[in-house]
């Protein structure tokens, strides 16, 4: 056993692509014999992960879990990818994604903490369990993203678009509403806003929460467009500010027109809902994850 060093574990990991803990276990089980450890990992199906890891995983599921905490709630949305939609319909994969979402609640959706959290009913981390499942199912898989919303008083409402199984589908949305009002009323308006977010894809909840680089880029584009009209600089500045307001109305949740009625701003919808709920409502925030968003897949993959 004395020959099992960090360097030995690293060497086995590089040879097989298996997780560090699995490599350490394999070496312990085989008395530090490298070749036997490789065979041990192969028998367990863990070394297959290395062969699959280079393949693009753009399918899978986005899953949601919400847990009430006294007067408030914690909601999480996670994305777990697979190579094919076929695997996403696999009950084993679906159960794993559900377990990961439930585990994410305990760490309030923190991605790094979730990766290292203990997978339910196993003596290994979530990340290690996913790697093990790669070997078992035979496709590359990965935990790509995790986001959480915590509301100390109020609700976290949710919506899943393109639902494949309970609480998981193609798009997952969370909306946090802070209020001491009627919970049923809060959930009702929260779900409607979550449906709006799924369709309208806002960039932020409020204007002041927009990424400054996004605003700067948009301002530059609008200024160039305005200059093309030949107007003087003082007029161009006014034109840019006017068009920026239009950009905010298209990109900021509270400024967007509610897709359900097509005429009321979302901010006003929340204000009106407060009357029914019996207390003021504050939008804490939202989270929206869409399956495979931003992933580029190679056309020549076999």
Image: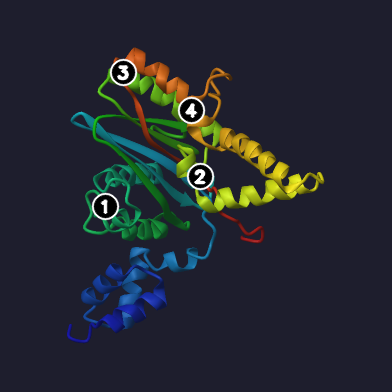
Q: Which mark is residue 291?
A: 2
Q: Which mark is residue 119?
A: 1
Callout 2 secondary element? loop
Q: Are marks 3 and 2 in contact (CB under 8 Å)?
A: no
Question: Disc 1 to disc 2, how far (Cα)?
Answer: 22 Å
Q: Which residue is mark 4?
A: 195
Labels 3 and 1: the sequence-earlier one: 1
Label 3: few (<14), some (14–19) or many (≥20) C-alpha neighbours in 10 Å: few
In the rendered image, which quarter contains the N terminus? bottom left
Callout 4 secondary element? helix
Question: Disc 3 to disc 2, how far (Cα)?
Answer: 29 Å
Q: Which residue is mark 3?
A: 184
128 or 37: nearer the viewer: 128
Q: Are marks 1 and 2 in contact (CB under 8 Å)?
A: no
Q: Nearer the viewer, mark 3 or mark 2?
A: 3
Examine the rendering and report whether any part of residue 169 can be seen: no
């Amino acid at each position: 056993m004395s020959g099992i060093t960090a360097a030995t574990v690293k060497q086995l990991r590089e040879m097989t692509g298996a997780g560090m803990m699995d490599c350490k276990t394999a070496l312990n089980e085989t008395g530090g014999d490298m070749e036997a450890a490789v065979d041990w990992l192969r028998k367990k199906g863990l070394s297959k992960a290395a062969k699959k890891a280079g393949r693009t995983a753009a399918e899978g599921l986005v899953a949601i879990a919400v847990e009430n905490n006294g007067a408030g709630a914690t909601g999480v949305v996670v994305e777990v990818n697979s190579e094919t939609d076929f695997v996403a319909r696999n009950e084993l994969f679906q159960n794993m994604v559900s377990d990961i979402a439930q585990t994410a609640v305990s760490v309030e959706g923190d991605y790094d903490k979730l990766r290292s959290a203990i997978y339910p009913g196993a003596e290994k981390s979530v990340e290690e369990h996913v790697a093990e499942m790669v070997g078992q199912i035979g496709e590359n898989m990965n935990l790509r993203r995790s986001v959480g919303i915590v509301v100390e008083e109020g609700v976290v409402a949710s919506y899943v678009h393109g639902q494949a199984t309970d609480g998981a589908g193609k798009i997952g949305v969370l909306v946090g509403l802070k209020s001491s009002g009627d919970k049923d009323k809060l959930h009702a308006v929260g779900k409607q806003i979550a449906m709006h977010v799924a369709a309208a894809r806002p960039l932020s909840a409020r204007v002041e929460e927009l990424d400054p680089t996004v605003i700067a880029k948009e301002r530059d584009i609008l200024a160039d467009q305005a200059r093309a009209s030949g107007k003087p600089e003082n007029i161009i500045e006014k034109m840019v500010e006017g068009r920026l307001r239009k950009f905010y109305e298209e990109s900021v949740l509270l400024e967007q027109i509610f897709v359900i009625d097509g005429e009321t701003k979302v901010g006003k919808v929340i204000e009106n809902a407060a009357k029914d709920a019996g207390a003021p409502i504050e939008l804490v925030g939202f989270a929206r994850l869409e399956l495979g968003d931003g992933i580029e897949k190679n056309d020549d993959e076999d």
